[in-house]
Image (cartoon, grey):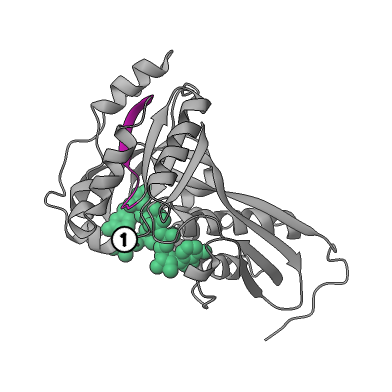
Amino acid sequence: MATDLPPTFPDCTVTEFAPAKINLTLHVTGQRADGYHLLDSLVVFADVGDRVTVRAAKALALTITGPQAAALPVTDDNLVLRAARLMQGHAAITLEKALPVSSGIGGGSADAAATLRALARLMDLPLPEDSAVLRLGADVPVCLLGRAVRMQGVGERLTPVPDLPQAWLVLVNPGVAVATPEVFRRLASKDNPAMPPQISPFPTLEGFVACLQTMRNDMEDAATAIAPVIGAVRSALSAQPGCLLSRMSGSGATCFGLFAAQDSARAAARAIQSAQPRWWVAPARMLS
Ligand SMILES: C[C@](O)(CO)[C@H](O)COP(=O)(O)OP(=O)(O)OC[C@H]1O[C@@H](n2ccc(N)nc2=O)[C@H](O)[C@@H]1O
Ligand SMILES: Nc1ncnc2c1ncn2[C@@H]1O[C@H](COP(=O)(O)OP(=O)(O)OP(=O)(O)O)[C@@H](O)[C@H]1O
């Protein structure tokens, strides 16, 4: 049911960027009685992502455009609409979908967070309370924060980390959607060691990478069992000159390579894309 807007409602549009979320590490350290898993993850963002534009309207409506739009039909449970309903936002919303769907880089969560931010700006309203944000999805709180952070609990405990060194990423998705609940179900162990209690400052990228190498993504084996092509993605990234570290993000199938120089990241992305024209490949700056 459409509701009339207050006469003073500003006639403008607001656009918010929805950056890809990357789990540089993802330790699964336990499971709660309700089935949700306890995590310990170093999360960063990349300068590639979706874009959410909101415009005041008499009723809530969503249009999806962009290179990945075909993979995401407009349905009532789209996270953009769920987020907008939380804000009671009457808005015409356009989601420009650039990130592959169900790919471990938090596309839906990033879109939900961007929608909350955009509607808060458009309507000059506060953001919803933390528990409501978490109910949208375990990755929505971290996406709402939108900067490098240690994520614990089921996704709600966010602790600042020291400034991270500048780095470049190559994100590669082989075009296979991996369902997060299935990967959690298939974990061989749900009770793995956490990251060290303190994350110290990293004066150099080399030191940062050495530290990351002592950590893991505990979902990678289970995701690779579901989508063996993840192994090929990891190999393709690791084989690139200048790749300091490669690992899967989230529940997959997207993997990232970490590079010291933008040129090497771009060259690696070009090489992988030309060898695998059907894969989604994106060079990006790591946002910390
Ligand atoms: C794997 C991660 O991407 C790591 O950042 C996230 O934890 C997943 O976040 P998300 O996609 O926003 O997850 P949700 O949409 O809340 O949950 C999808 C499903 O994943 C499982 N799930 C999710 C988060 C969590 N801490 N434990 C879980 O067991 C639950 O079965 C849930 O039904
Ligand atoms: N705006 C949206 N963008 C992407 N997926 C959405 C969106 N809204 C709802 N979904 C649904 O959410 C599910 C997960 O999609 P998403 O792309 O967020 O996965 P993901 O990248 O693996 O997330 P995460 O890294 O948080 O586990 C899919 O089933 C998808 O249909």
- Disc 1 is placed on an element classified as loop
In this view, the residue in front, 264 or 56, is 264
In this view, the residue in front, 281 or 197, is 281
Residue placed furthest toward the left:
188
Asked where in the image residue 245 lies, by quadrant, the reply is top left
Q: Is residue 262 magenta?
A: no
Q: Whereabouts is ligand 1, in terms of quadrant?
A: bottom left
Q: Is residue 243 magenta?
A: yes
Judge left or right: residue 99 versus residue 177: right
Q: How many marks?
A: 1
What amino acid is labelled 1 in the image?
Val
Residue at 52% in and 78% down: 76
Judge left or right: residue 180 versus residue 11: left
Q: Tell whether circle 1 marks a residue whose Cβ is less than 8 angstroms from ligand 2.
A: yes
Residue at 31% in and 61% down: 178
- For label 1, the crowd category at 10 Å Cα-Cα, with few meaning under 14, some 14 to 19 and many 20 or more, is many
In this view, the residue in front, 236 or 129, is 236
Asked where in the image residue 95 lies, by quadrant, the reply is bottom right
Give coordinates of residue 220: x percent, y percent: 23, 47
Asked where in the image residue 213 lies, by quadrant, the reply is top left
Residue placed furthest toward the right:
7
- Residue labelled with disc 1: 178
Which image quarter is the N terminus in?
Answer: bottom right
